[in-house]
Image (spheres, grey):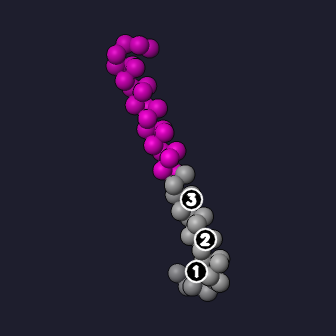
Amino acid sequence: MKIIEGMPKYSRGRHYATLTLGIAFFVLVAARACYISMIIVDTGMSGGI
C-alpha cells in the first residue's frame, strides 16, 4: 500500500470513494443477476415457460 500512502490526502479519499462505488455497483449488478435467474428458474419449474 505504499502507492496509496504516497498520494495526497484528497487523492487517497478519491481512490477509496471510487473503490467503494465500484464494489457497491458490482454487488448491485450481482444481486440483480441472481434475482433474474431466480425468476427464470421459478417460472421454469412452475411450467410457465
Q: CA distance from mark 3 to mark 2?
A: 10 Å
Q: Main secondary structure of the magenta part?
A: helix
**Which label sits on residue 15?**
2
Q: Is residue 19 left or right of residue 39?
A: right
Q: Of helix, strand and loop, which one carries label 2?
A: helix
- Please name the amino acid that badge 3 sits on: Leu
Residue 30 coordinates in the image, percent (x, y): 48, 45
Pointer 1 residue: 4
Q: Is residue 41 left or right of residue 6?
A: left
Mark before the other along the chain sequence, 1 or 3: 1
Residue 31 to residue 45: above or below = below
Pointer 3 and pointer 2: residues touching (CB < 8 Å)? Answer: no
Q: Nearer the viewer, mark 1 or mark 3?
A: 3
Pointer 1 and pointer 3: residues touching (CB < 8 Å)? Answer: no
Q: Which residues are magenta?
A: 26-49
- Quadrant for residue 14, please give it: bottom right
Residue 5 coordinates in the image, percent (x, y): 57, 85
- Quadrant for residue 48, please give it: top left
Pointer 3 residue: 21
- Please name the amino acid that badge 2 sits on: His
Residue 18 to residue 11: above or below = above
Q: Residue furthest left?
A: 45
Q: Of helix, strand and loop, which one carries label 3?
A: helix
Task: Determine the residue positioned at 52% across, 51% down.
Answer: 26
- Please name the amino acid that badge 1 sits on: Ile
Q: CA distance from mark 1 to mark 2?
A: 8 Å
Q: Quadrant of the C terminus?
A: top left
Q: CA distance from mark 1 to mark 3?
A: 18 Å
The reply to whether residue 3 is in sight is: no
**Which label sits on residue 36?**
none
Magenta includes 48? yes
Task: Determine the residue positioned at 43% across, 25% down.
Answer: 40
